[in-house]
Amino acid sequence: MRWSLAQRLQQHLLAVVALSWLSAVALAMLAVRHEMDAVLDSALLSLVSQMPLGDVGAPPSAIATLPVSGDDDVLHVLVRDASGRTLRMSGLASPAPWPLSLQEGLSTVAGWRVATRRTPDGSVVVQVGESVADRHEALAESSLALVLPMLALLPLAAFAIHLLVRRSFQGVHAAGEHWRARPEGDPSPLQTHDLPTEFDPLIGSIDTLVARLQGLVQAERAFAASSAHELRTPVAAARAQAQRLVAELSAGETQAHAIALVRSLDRISNTTTKLLQLARVESGIGFLREPMDLRQLATLVLDEFRHPAHTADRLQVELPKQPVVVQGDLDALGIAMRNLIENALKHAPDAQVRVSIESPGRLVVSDDGPGVPSDALSSLLKPFSRGPTASEGTGLGLAIVSRIAEQQRATLSLESPPPGQAHGFRATLSMHPGDAVPP
């Protein structure tokens, strides 16, 4: 199961903040309790030392409570003589809750914190006490006063941590978009200016992997190109000898075999040519882009198809009077245009092929042949996929055009039949307009 680094950081940071805050609150509570005990003990000692004992010898009927009295008193006063008789009392519901024998000073007994003082002759004992439960209650209220505001701030802390982590990861997203926008086939190391240094080992590993893959791809391309190139010369020589043999033989079975040999050599020659084109395209020929006249390129490519009589009569060319400038590479777009025209002539052998250049930058090649089933159009762009046709071919022509379109940031669309027609096939290559007419 996939996990999110940002979410994990947020959870861990929030947990650390919460634990740190709880630890701080616990230490603060200990400090408050210590200070509270010290202050309250000091208040007990101060009060017991200030108690007037001048008239404590009055008879019991003269016993009176101190000015501050009642069940809600925090400090309770008890004055007794040496025999334990109560002389004065304040805030106590029942007399004598504390032992008479307590030593002078502070003592803790039966849930009370008591300060004791005696007269020099020991005839009068004054005690001031405070309930320990009251102290705990006061400490709990003080703790709540610390805890509740911090609890209310936890959602704010979580939101702040979320914003901080999200902002920290903006560099990762920006770097990803930058890498995604890089030209295809660019093997240069990844830029890490906006990334934290913790990502350096990962980026280094990715660069190493890309370099290895680039080496493998280049080796594969070099092998295909070298093999195709090495085959062209012997195939051309063998075809020339086979054509000579056809010319020298008289009509018959032997000449028919020689003609079949020429056709087989033509297929091999066509395959090697396509492989060479594919190798050039895969090497990145289509990544170059500069202003060029599409009309002028069409004129050069169409000259190659006007020499064979069986193709010149089938071509209908429509070129605009004004230059059509696009952003592209002359060689790559020439290969694409040549393959589109060859594809139409080959797979619609009895049809008319129309080639037109349209502004602002479209090449349209169409025919009025039987066409291709609509559900088979997408498969035509895959290498070595020929579709439902009886014509000979390698299945690389449209795949090469599609690859060039990707590299040139152009759009290749296939339609069969074209809109408004009952049958036929149309391929449209749309390119970005150029900035100026090339010299």
Image: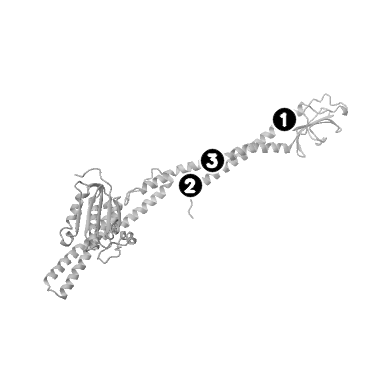
Q: Verify CB contact (< 8 Å) between mark 2 and mark 1.
A: no
Mark 2 = which residue?
6
Q: Is residue 331 left or right of residue 78?
A: left
**In the rendered structure, which amino acid carries the disc numbered 1?**
Ala
Q: Residues within 10 Å of mark 2 (few under 14, many from 20)?
A: some
Label 3–label 1 contact, CB within 8 A:
no
Neighbor class of circle 3 (other Cα within 10 Å; few <14, some 14-19, many 20+) is some
- SS category of the residue bearing label 1: helix
Q: Secondary structure at mark 3?
A: helix
| Residue occupied by mark 1 | 43
Work out whether residue 115 can be spotted. no
User: Which disc, if any, is residue 170?
Assistant: none
Give coordinates of residue 141: x percent, y percent. 67, 37
Q: Which residue is mark 3?
A: 157
The chosen color scheme is: one colour
Q: Is 62 situated left or right of 176 in this image? A: right
Q: Residue drawn 48% across and 52% down? A: 3
Q: Which of marks 1 and 3 precedes in the sequence?
A: 1
Residue 37, given in percent of the width and then of the height, sits at 69, 34
Quadrant that contains the C terminus: top left
CA separation, marks 3 and 1? 40 Å
In the figure, 52 relative to 205: above or below? above
Q: Does residue 124 appear in the picture of this structure?
A: yes
Of the residues tagged 3 and 1, which is closer to the observer?
3
Q: In the rendered structure, which disc, 2 or 3, sits on the residue that comes first in sequence?
A: 2
